[in-house]
Image (tube, grey):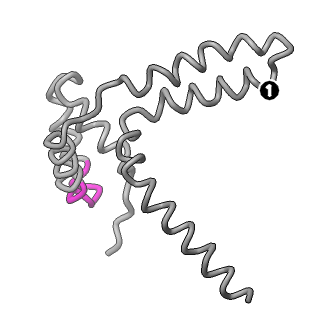
Amino acid sequence: MRARIRRRIRLGFFLLIVAMSPVARAVRPRWRPLLAGTVLTVTGFILRSGPGSIALLPGLMLLITAPLLPGLPAEDRGRYGQLKRELASYSTPAQRRDLEAMLDRYPDGITRELRAILATQGPRRWQA
């Protein structure tokens, strides 16, 4: 009996994850305003009888405007993923230093996307 209940719970969570993956893809470029709106709305709702209730209106405004933000087109997502994979090939510290030295020759406005990707990848340990 317990095994059947556990199996149904696991199956339910799996189906929930599969069903929510398109929603996650749609929310990906808009997660920051959604997070800020959720935090402000919950804070304003919890503190609605005090001075914290002033956070409710900005939170609701962020939640309403987040779906209106433009997302990345499919070709930009593909290009961004390919760029991340190519930059991941610079794995040794020497290769990373050479790449960063090359990027330092150009203004930050041109290399902003590359630097952001490199910052998310973080330093890697070289194993000999």
Q: Is residue 16 left or right of residue 6?
A: left
Secondary element type, mark 1: helix
Residue 9 percent location from the top left of the image: 63, 73
**Which quarter of the rendering shows the N terminus?**
bottom right
Which quadrant of the view contains residue 124? bottom left
Q: Amino acid at mark 1?
A: Ile
Horizontal relation, residue 81 to residue 14: left or right: left
87 displayed left or right of 2: left
Q: Is residue 43 above or below residue 78?
A: above
Residue depicted at x 61% and y 77%: 8
x then y, percent, for residue 55? 68, 15
Q: Position of residue 60 (x, y in %)?
A: 58, 19
**Nearer-the-camera pick, 58 or 113:** 58
Q: Residue at x 79, y 26 (%)?
A: 46
User: Is residue 30 placed above or below 56 in the rendered structure?
Assistant: below
- The residue lying at 17 percent from left, 52 percent from top is 82
67 vs 7: above or below? above
Taking the spot 38% from the left edge, 41% from the top edge, the residue there is 28
Please state which of residues 74 and 106 is positioned toward the viewer in this rendering: 74
Q: How many marks?
A: 1
Residue 42: which quarter of the image? top right
Q: Position of residue 57 (x, y in %)?
A: 63, 13
Image side of residue 66 versus residue 97, left or right:
right
What residue is pinned by disc 1? 46
**Dot 1, how many residues are within 10 Å of its Cα: few (below 14), some (14-19), or many (20+)?**
few
Is residue 47 located in the magenta-colored stretch of the structure? no
Which residue range is magenta in the image? 88-96
Name the residue furthest right.
49
Q: Nearer the viewer, residue 60 or 84?
A: 60
Residue 91 covered by magenta stretch: yes
Which quadrant: the C terminus? bottom left
